[in-house]
Image (spheres, helix red, strand yellow):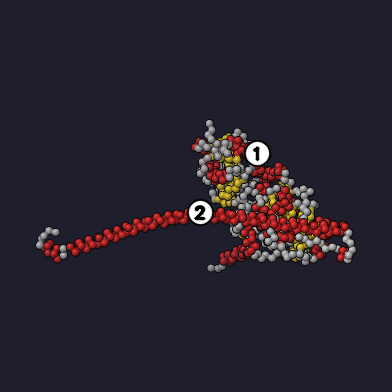
Amino acid sequence: MAGPSPQFSIVTPVYAPPIDVLADTIASVLAQEHADWEWVLVDDASPDPDVRRVIADAAGQDGRIRLVERDTNGHIVAASNDAVAEARGEFLVFLDHDDLLTPDALARMARAIDAEPDADYLYSDEDKVGDDGELFGRFTKPVWSPERLRGQMYTSHLSVMRTALVREVGAFREGYDGSQDHDLALRVSERARRVVHVPEVLYHWRAVAGSAAADINAKPYADDAGRRAVQDQLDRLGIAGTVGPGREPGRYVIERRLDPAVRVSIVIPTIGQSATVFGERRVMVVDTVRSALEHTDHDNLELVVVHDMPTPPEVLDSLREIAGDRLTLVEYALPFNFSQKINLGCLHASGERLVFLNDDVEVISPRWLENLVGPLDEPDVGLTGAKLYFSDGSIQHAGHGYWNKHYHHPFRYWTREESGPFGELVVNREMTGVTAACSAMRRDVFLEVGGFPEALPSNFNDVDLCYKVAHLGYRTVWVANCELFHFESQTRDGTVSAWERHFVVRRWGIPDVDHFTPADIATPMMNPHRLLDARLAEPRRGARKKATARRPR
Amino acid sequence: MVEPTEPDARADAGEAESPVARLERENEAMRREVLEARHSLLVNRDHVVGTEAEIGRLNRDVLRMQQELISSRKKIRALQKRRNGLASRNQDLQGQLTAARARTQALRAELDRQVAARVPLSSRVARRLRGGRR
């Protein structure tokens, strides 16, 4: 007769693991500090009888271990579902047959559940373990980020889910092999009352040849399954969009569709200045508007240009020519105040979606507006931002990060081709903040937060706006497939005054830890001159070594 | 409050303003007034949200300070207890020291007395030579 239900049921589908590796996995479970668990291992008809023998031996020594033997090989979904069906615990703990739990894994999860009793889904940080037992590749994860989960299966290991909820959603689905965990995470998170991130490494993912941990290309079929899983979620939630392949396997790109009835107002502050870009003289705002209109299919559009008095009339004429009756001109006669110009532009705007756009950008990605504005259809998304490049193609902005007493541009100077340590640069994701150089809000949220702070005419006004958005409970989403050049150095005076920073600190406190972009993931901002210097120095050092080697004795 | 828009030149020249023109002028004035009111409301809302945030931040600071205060008070109490214990132990040691000093003094006195009472060497040598028992 079965005893009382344990708190945790560890579930492990097993198929032909190396025996020594399986033994390590068993040892890691037996070493748990927390004792209230059971372990259901489902052998999926492994050809080597030693696999069953090893598990049976372990079960003989510890009554909490149970072996379920399948007669035929049903693959990972069938085997996992058999394990889920057998589980008696309140929470399911998903462990692969060759991976390792840290000794405190279950104890730490139990403490997190005690702290958040309505948690239905918990996930921890993870790292990888090589053949030699060396640990590497720590993935410090963000707090719960539903948009990012659409872009990649970032929650992964260690995942703990409430058993009743997993059964309620139908457990793993056939046809999603290789991404069955991603599919389950998406479906469980839709109904979870709370999703909790435990910011500690509780899982060592074994990186052996042929595993996804060692090579992201190892399971090409998984990519297709993952794409379908994400598309299914969009369809279930009524999100208008199409999921496509990302830059690398396991990453997904969402192309949003905008309801033609939704009116979008693009607000651009300008003084109508010109600058040399890519070797040619440009009237910045004219090219901004031209590129913005060229790269969108959305017609229900309004351009609100807030122009200072000195703006040359011919610039305004050019804008009229390009934008026609979609153009609204707002004259601004006061001293420079970016916040006030944007606020006034928004008050003149008629759209339900507001896009803030600097006049020194060039849109380079197709359907930029749809992708930027689309996420705002979700009621809890209050603000979206774009990916901006310097003219040399290096990253100027990939979201804000607020940590270590300052406001940062994580991943600045990385290149357009790079994906980031864990896909950060190629998937949409929740962030603490985004730049106002290209961002979007729903009108109701803009009014609710009180627009941009006019007390900050030049710097940190976007930082304050992002804080306000988060303060009122909205998500800020950075959109990786909304790309623009930002010729900031052409137009901006970078001087920052102490009082500006103090204004933000007075409201929001001193930034300490960023929960979406941990400081250890985002490479500290690097001076491009130092980068270049380092690259140039490498061959010089090599040349010196060669010269030394040839020196006659 | 927004100033009404300037009447057109015909009004300046004493010509009667048409009802449509007057309505348009009033409408424009009203539109600007509404815009200014909405702008004021927006700025005011920013101030309210910012003030709420500042209050929240100050409350968190107060809570943290209170926790630090409680923790510091506990430390003070522990240190006071330790100090009192040490003072008491110090007092005990002082008593032991005084007693030890007195004992030392007594022993010294006793030693001196014994030394003084000791038989001189010459007498002891003479006694030995005479075959007397020690």
The percent position of residue A295, horizontal first and vertical second, equals 77, 54
Query: For the view shown, which residue lies furthest in the bottom direction?
Result: A552
Quadrant assignment, res A543: bottom right
Query: For the view shown, which residue lies furthest in the left direction?
Result: B130
Labels 1 and 2 in the same subunit: no
The percent position of residue B88, horizontal first and vertical second, equals 37, 56
Q: Chain of mark 1?
A: A
The local crowd at label 2, few if under 14, some if 14 to 19, many if 20 or more residues have their Cα within 10 Å, is few
Q: Residue at x 75, y 48 (%)?
A: A257
Which of these two is toward me, A545 or A105?
A: A105
CA gap between label 1 and label 2 equals: 48 Å
Instruction: Give the residue at mark 2.
Output: B70
Please tell me whether mark 1 or mark 2 is closer to you in this view.
2
Q: Residue at x 73, y 52 (%)?
A: A443
Callout 2: SS: helix
User: Which numbered dot is residue A518?
Assistant: none
Which of these two is toward me, A97 or A33?
A: A33
Q: Chain of mark 2?
A: B
Q: Residue at x 29, y 60 (%)?
A: B101
Asked whether the viewer can see residue A63, the reply is: yes
Which of these two is toward me, A166 or A504?
A: A504
Which of these two is toward me, A194 or A471?
A: A471
Q: Is residue A489 above or below residue A108?
A: below
The percent position of residue A349, horizontal first and vertical second, equals 77, 55
Amino acid type shown at disc 2: Ile
Q: Is residue A240 above or below residue A306?
A: above
Instruction: Give the residue at mark 1.
Output: A169
Callout 1: SS: loop
